Image: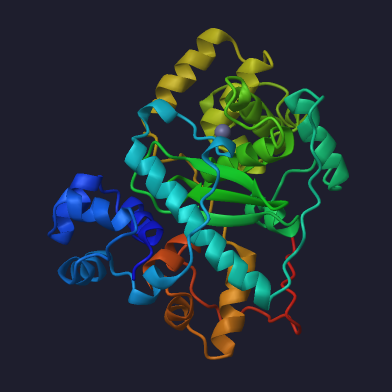
Amino acid sequence: MYNPERVELVRRRLGLTKIGFAEQLGVDRKAIQRFESGDYDLPEIAREKLLMVSGYPEGFFAKSTPEYPNPDGVSFRSLRSLTSSSRDAAIAAGALAFELDDWIRSEYELPTHDLTAERDLAPAEAAMRLRVRWGIGNRPIGNMMNLLEAHGVRVFSLVEETRHLDAYSLWRNDQPYVFLNTLKTAERSRFDAAHELGHLVMHRHTGSTHPKAESEADTFASAFLMPPDDVRAEIPWVRSLRDIIEKKQRWGVSAAALAYTLHKSGRITDWHYRGYCIQLGKYGRDAEPNPMRREVSQVWTKLLTDLWRQGISLSRLASRLSIPERELSALLFGIVADPNTSGDTDRKLHVVS
Ligand SMILES: [Zn+2]
């Protein structure tokens, strides 16, 4: 018999309503309800269609009840513009990530996290405290994703087809997770990663759904990526937008994020800031002037390369876990094994940040 909760997970991944799902399976809602109540299995025709429509292997539906990220611990930005089906699909991706992560843990030793909760500090101070603790001081952060990985945060990707979903993060059994939407520019992705780090550090115990959580995480991210002292030293004055577009490279942020920081600290006037925003708006949300290269996960590159050396391709891993290869690839930034990556000699995956 198929596990109804597994079928439900796939429905969410497909972004279908219950009615739409029943239609796709060629049965009526009642047949699904009887199945969900646990009294009847799905009709055979529906099972066949389910495998065909979803691309999920039969083994997936026989596994035990999935563990979902707790939605209360997950904060979504611009929740209002996010449809519930996009939200459900992204949360369901988290459930798949847990299964992948559990398997990885059983095979490999990954860095353990060293995050401590900061509840009593203002967001910018919490960011600076963490910089000091991690030995970064006021230096720019070369690679935000690798920094998180080196400090034991598990970073997965989301390829959700929505611009309204930036990222989310959560704690699970003392393990911090960050999910990043890969449709965004490299600069915005870095900011999202720093924003989620802020949630993990500041909102672990209070949850990140309270009204001020979003602005706190943004303030944390700004200070974490652009330490105020360093910005002051590097940008004594701003002559034009071109200065900002040139200087932003140092911190790996968007021109908009740097302009916002400069305006907030009073380095540029309201009038200039408004002008810069209009000029930057012309690039659109999905483009960045003077763009940087996208960051690549070191943990997943090393892992996939090590598996590949053992003759385990992504598709073999997928069938071992009974999860479609496309879903694994979507969680792992579409990374393919890189034979040129130096291998770790043991099953410990080291990360250089
Ligand atoms: Zn947030």
Q: Is residue 340 visible?
A: no
Residue drawn at (45%, 70%), measured in percent from left and top? 63
- The image quadrant in which ligand 1 is located: top right
**Toward the viewer: 214 or 7?**
7
Residue drawn at (59%, 44%), measured in percent from left and top? 169
Total labels drawn:
0
Residue 144, horizontal then vertical, whole percent: 65, 50
* Quarter of the figure with residue 4: bottom left
Residue 153, horizontal then vertical, whole percent: 68, 54
Is 259 displayed left or right of 57 in the figure? Answer: right
Which quadrant is home to the N terminus? bottom left
Residue drawn at (64%, 32%), measured in percent from left and top? 207
Which quadrant is home to the C terminus? bottom right
Is 134 displayed left or right of 84 in the figure? Answer: right
* Quarter of the figure with residue 24: bottom left
Q: Is residue 83 visible?
A: yes
The answer to whether 21 is drawn above or below residue 338 in the figure is above
The answer to whether 343 is drawn above or below residue 210 in the figure is below
The answer to whether 40 is drawn above or below residue 34 in the figure is below
**Toward the viewer: 331 or 18?**
18
Residue 74, horizontal then vertical, whole percent: 55, 39
Tell me the colour scheme of the image. Answer: rainbow
Residue 116, horizontal then vertical, whole percent: 81, 42
**Toward the viewer: 240 or 79?**
79
Is 18 displayed left or right of 278 in the figure? Answer: left
**Toward the viewer: 22 or 316?**
22
